[in-house]
Image: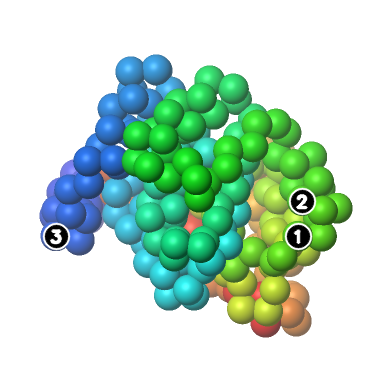
Amino acid sequence: MTPEIWSQTEDYLSALLCPPDADLALALHCSEQEHLPPINVSPLQGRQISLLARMVGARRILEVGTLGGYSTLWLAKTLPPDGRMITIENNPVHAAVAIGNLKQAGLSGQVEVRLGNAAERLAALIDEKAEPYDFFFIDADQHNNVVYFESCLRLGRPGSVIVLDNVVRSGEVRQTGTTNQAVRATQQVLQMVGSAEDVDGAVFQTVGRRGHDGMLVARIR
């Protein structure tokens, strides 16, 4: 198996399973025009997280790491009419692009983009004692993964699902004694899930145009 085969297979699957969507296409175009880094989820990954959100019947969704709103749109489109979503973004340029993309898609009324430090924003949500969230997607600065994951646990309920992206990183996650803070934080989250009595989890490895990576899918018992 080669990266070329991974890419070709991803293109084949995306063509079959990810129907054209004008809102999603526009979000990618606007992100490119504003020179945002091309680190958004792939179409197939977007389909995966949206399917997971639908499977749990998510009415309240929380996302950590918005970028241009591409993954946000995938998730927001699964919400019922009374559903709501909050997405947290630290970069004001990224947040502005996401707000514009959500407005173009007619989803501004259901999705709130909160600008600021994600750890602080999550702490504020905990202090608000708001209704628990049903689904979480974490795709942000990975050295803070422990804080993000623990905060999502506190903001969830039994049955809530937490998805953490980029946990494999071409196999880096298996390296012992690494000094990479992002990898160490991810390892801590995986160890936490593996030993927790109130969380079930599994990692789904992926290959494609972005290489070898994967997502942690965890469920609060």
Which labelled disc corresponds to residue 102?
none
Circles 3 and 2: CB distance less than 8 Å?
no
Q: Residue at x 34, y 25 (%)?
A: 30
Crowd band around label 2 with a 10 angstrom C-alpha radius: few (<14), some (14–19), many (20+): some
Q: Nearer the viewer, mark 2 or mark 1?
A: 1
Q: Amino acid at mark 2?
A: Leu
x and y percent of residue 134 in the render?
59, 68
* Inter-mark Cα distance, 3 to 2: 39 Å
Could you tell me which secondary element the residue under label 3 belongs to?
A: helix
Mark found first going from the N terminus, 3 or 1: 3
Which labelled disc corresponds to residue 125?
2
x and y percent of residue 172 in the render?
54, 48
Residue underneath mark 3: 16
Q: Amino acid at mark 3?
A: Leu
x and y percent of residue 168 in the render?
51, 53
Q: Is 198 or 21 nearer to us in this picture?
A: 21
In the shown orientation, is residue 16 left or right of residue 42? left
In the shown orientation, is residue 29 left or right of residue 34? left
Q: Nearer the viewer, mark 3 or mark 1?
A: 1
Which labelled disc corresponds to residue 130?
1
* Inter-mark Cα distance, 2 to 1: 7 Å
x and y percent of residue 142 in the render?
63, 42
Mark found first going from the N terminus, 3 or 2: 3
User: Is there any visible trace of residue 77 in the rendered image?
Assistant: yes
Could you tell me which secondary element the residue under label 2 belongs to?
A: helix
Could you tell me which secondary element the residue under label 1 belongs to?
A: loop
Mark found first going from the N terminus, 2 or 1: 2
Circles 3 and 1: CB distance less than 8 Å?
no
Q: How is the image coloured?
A: rainbow
Circles 2 and 1: CB distance less than 8 Å?
yes
Q: Which corner quadrant holds the N terminus?
A: bottom left
